[in-house]
Image: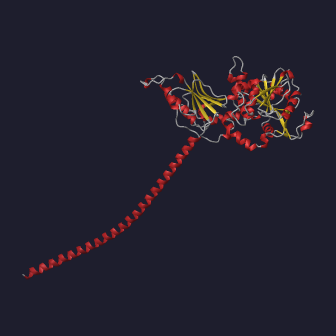
C-alpha cells in the first residue's frame, strides 16, 4: 500500500500477516549489568517468534565485561559512544528489521510483536514504542506484571505532545523524524541501508539526526501506543535538558536543515543546505544569470550544483578566444572559488538535502521565487512543484522543486514502466504553477522581490530626502529673492523721489532761465533806446 505523507492509518486496516520477517534487537550497553539482565529477561518473554528474533548486545568498553545468556550474541566495541556501539551491532545484525533498545528499557511482552505487525504491512516504516519512565527501585529479577511493578510512571512527555498535536503524526507534520529515539524504536533494514548508519562524529543527538536521514530515505514514522516499555529511571535529557540541548544543537544544526531556528545566521554555509539548485551549464551569460539569481534569493540556505563536462576541459592558452569550450571555461573560472557552487559532471545531490530545485538555463527566478515555491511545498505537503515557463511545439520548459523524501519513498514503490512523478503524486502530491506569477523572467531584468523592494524603498527614500533638501534650498533662494525684491522696491521708491526732486529742480531752473532771458532782453532793449 502507498501511504500519502505520514498518514499511516490506512495500514492499520490491513489484515495481520503470518510473521516471516526477522528482527535484530541491538542493545548497546556500558556497565549496568543489573539493568541489562532485566532488559534481556523482558526480551525472552516476547510473544514474537524466537526463531525470527536475534538479540545483539554491544559491550561498549564495560569493566568488568558484560555477561549475556547463550541465546544472545555479544559484540565488543571499544570505541566509546552510543553511535559507535549501535553501528557495531548493526554491522553484525542479520534481521530484516533493526530494533534499537537501550539496556535500561524493559519491553512489555507484546511490544516486539506489535512493532513487527506494522513492519509486515509496509517495508518503509519506523515504529516507536510508548516508553514510560519509572522511579521504582530496580528489582533483582523481572516482575511478572510490569505495570503493577513500575506504575505510576511518567510518559515520554514531548513525544506524547508531538503525537497529540499532529493527530498521531498524520496531519502533515514538519518533523516526524523526531519520533526516532534509540530507547525502543524499530526500523526496516532497507531504510537504514539507504540512509546510512549513525553519525559517530556527533556527541549527542545521534538518534534525531539518523531519524532525519531515515525521513529523507522515504520513511513513514508510526507511534505505537500498544507497544509499551518501561525505562528504569529518568533519561539523561530529563535530568539535564538545557546542557544537553546546548551540546546537541551546536552540531545537529549543521546536519538537520529542518531545524530552521538553529540556523539564524543569514550569511554562513552549512554542511547540509536546505535547498540545492541544479543548473545545467550553457552559455556563460545565460547560465550566470540563473546561478547569480539563485545565490541572491531571499532563502540564503541554498547551494548550486552546476552540471557540465568540467573534467574534459583543457586550457587553450594560445588562442583562448577561439576555444569552442570558452563559455564553460569562463563558468568554471567564475565559480571555482564560490563556496556555494559545486561544479559536477552529473546532477547528483546529497540525499540529506530536503529540496532539490531544478532550473533550466534561459529562465531567471526572482528573489522571492524560491521562498514562494517552498511555501507551496510545505503548506500543501507537495512532493513536486512544477513551474511552467514555456510551452511550444517542441515541448514544455519547466522548473521543478522536488521534495527529496517524497522521491525517495516513490523510488521504493515504483513499478516497472511506471512514472516516478506519478508515484510521487500518490505518496505526496504534484502541482503545476505559472512561472510569471512566481517571478520567473526570460532574462536578468533586475531582481524583483523583498530585497529588490527594500532597495527600491531605500532608493525612493533617498530620492525623497534629496528632493526635500532641494525644495528647502529653493525656498531659501525664494526668500532671498523676496528680500532682494523688497530692497529693489525701496530703492525704486527712493529713486522715484530723487527723480521727482530733480524734475522740480529742472523746472525751477527752466523758469529761472526764462526769467533771466526776459530780464536780459528787457535790459538790451532799454540800452538800445538810450542810444
Relative depth, front residue between 121 and 312: 312
Relative depth, front residue between 480 and 245: 245
Quadrant of the image occupied by residue 384: top right
Number of numbered labels in the structure image: 0
Q: Position of residue 420 (x, y in %)?
A: 68, 22
Relative depth, front residue between 137 and 351: 137
Image quarter in which the C terminus is found: bottom left
Query: Can residue 3 be seen by looking at this rendering?
Result: no
Most extreme residue toward the front is 64
Most extreme residue toward the top is 416
Image quarter in which the N terminus is found: top right
Q: Position of residue 254 (x, y in %)?
A: 66, 36
Quadrant of the image occupied by residue 160: top right
Residue at 84% across, 21% down = 52
Residue at 42% across, 24% down = 319
Q: Is residue 264 left or right of residue 151?
A: left
Residue at 15% across, 79% down = 522
Q: Position of residue 100 (x, y in %)?
A: 79, 30
Residue 313, above or below 291: above
Q: Is residue 103 left or right of residue 524?
A: right
Query: Can residue 266 be seen by looking at this rendering?
Result: yes
Quadrant of the image occupied by residue 162: top right
Q: Position of residue 477 (x, y in %)?
A: 43, 58
For the rendered model, the colour scheme is secondary structure
Most extreme residue toward the bottom is 530
Residue 312, above or below 239: above
Relative depth, front residue between 4 and 281: 281
Amino acid at each position: 500500500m502507498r501511504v500519502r505523507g505520514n498518514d499511516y492509518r490506512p495500514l492499520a486496516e490491513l489484515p495481520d500477516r503470518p510473521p516471516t520477517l526477522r528482527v535484530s534487537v541491538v542493545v548497546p550497553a556500558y556497565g549496568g549489568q543489573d539493568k541489562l539482565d532485566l532488559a534481556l529477561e523482558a526480551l525472552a518473554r516476547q510473544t514474537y517468534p524466537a526463531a525470527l528474533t536475534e538479540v545483539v548486545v554491544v559491550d561498549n568498553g564495560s569493566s568488568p565485561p558484560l555477561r549475556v545468556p547463550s541465546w544472545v550474541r555479544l559484540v565488543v566495541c571499544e570505541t566509546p559512544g552510543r553511535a559507535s556501539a549501535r553501528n557495531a551491532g548493526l554491522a553484525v545484525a542479520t534481521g530484516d528489521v533493526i530494533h534499537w533498545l537501550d539496556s535500561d528499557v524493559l519491553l512489555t511482552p507484546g511490544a516486539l510483536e506489535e512493532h513487527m505487525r506494522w513492519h509486515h504491512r509496509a517495508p518503509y516504516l519506523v515504529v516507536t514504542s510508548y516508553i514510560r519512565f519509572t522511579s521504582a527501585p530496580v528489582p533483582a529479577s523481572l516482575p511478572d506484571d510490569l505495570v503493577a511493578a513500575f506504575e505510576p510512571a511518567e510518559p515520554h512527555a514531548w513525544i506524547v505532545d508531538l503525537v497529540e498535536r499532529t493527530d498521531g503524526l498524520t496531519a502533515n507534520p514538519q518533523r516526524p523524524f523526531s519520533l526516532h529515539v534509540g530507547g525502543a524504536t524499530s526500523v526496516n533494514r532497507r531504510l537504514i541501508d539507504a540512509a546510512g548508519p549513525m553519525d559517530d562524529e556527533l556527541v549527542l543527538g545521534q538518534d534525531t539526526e539518523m531519524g532525519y536521514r531515515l525521513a529523507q530515505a522515504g520513511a513513514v514514522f508510526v507511534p505505537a501506543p500498544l507497544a509499551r516499555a518501561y525505562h528504569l529511571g529518568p533519561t539523561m535529557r530529563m535530568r539535564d535538558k538545557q546542557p544537553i540541548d546546548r551540546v546537541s544543537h551546536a552540531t545537529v544544526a549543521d546536519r538537520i536543515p529542518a531545524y530552521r531556528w538553529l540556523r539564524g545566521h543569514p550569511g554562513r554555509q552549512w554542511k547540509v543546505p536546505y535547498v540545492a539548485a541544479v543548473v545545467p551549464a550553457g552559455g556563460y551569460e545565460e547560465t550566470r544569470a540563473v546561478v547569480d539569481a539563485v545565490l541572491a534569493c531571499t532563502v540564503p540556505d541554498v547551494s548550486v550544483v552546476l552540471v557540465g563536462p568540467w573534467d574534459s576541459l583543457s586550457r587553450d592558452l594560445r588562442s583562448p578566444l577561439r576555444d569552442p569550450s570558452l563559455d564553460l571555461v569562463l563558468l568554471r573560472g567564475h565559480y571555482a572559488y564560490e563556496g556555494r557552487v559545486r561544479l559536477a559532471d552529473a546532477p547528483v545531490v546529497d540525499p540529506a538535502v530536503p529540496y532539490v530545485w531544478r532550473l533550466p538555463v534561459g529562465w531567471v527566478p526572482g528573489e522571492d521565487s524560491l521562498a514562494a515555491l517552498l511555501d507551496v511545498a510545505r503548506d500543501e505537503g507537495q512532493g513536486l512543484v512544477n513551474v511552467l515557463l514555456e510551452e511550444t511545439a517542441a515541448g514544455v520548459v519547466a522548473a521543478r522543486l522536488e521534495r527529496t523524501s517524497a522521491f525517495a519513498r516513490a523510488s521504493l514503490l515504483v513499478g516497472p514502466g511506471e512514472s516516478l512523478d506519478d508515484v510521487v503524486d500518490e505518496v505526496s502530491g504534484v502541482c503545476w504553477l505559472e512561472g510569471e506569477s512566481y517571478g520567473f523572467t526570460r532574462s536578468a531584468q533586475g531582481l524583483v522581490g523583498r530585497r529588490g523592494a527594500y532597495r527600491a524603498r531605500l532608493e525612493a527614500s533617498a530620492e525623497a530626502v534629496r528632493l526635500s533638501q532641494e525644495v528647502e534650498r529653493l525656498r531659501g533662494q525664494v526668500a532671498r529673492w523676496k528680500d532682494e525684491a523688497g530692497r529693489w522696491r525701496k530703492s525704486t521708491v527712493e529713486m522715484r523721489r530723487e527723480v521727482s526732486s530733480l524734475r522740480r529742480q529742472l523746472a525751477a531752473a527752466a523758469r529761472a532761465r526764462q526769467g533771466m532771458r526776459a530780464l536780459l532782453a528787457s535790459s538790451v532793449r532799454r540800452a538800445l533806446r538810450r542810444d
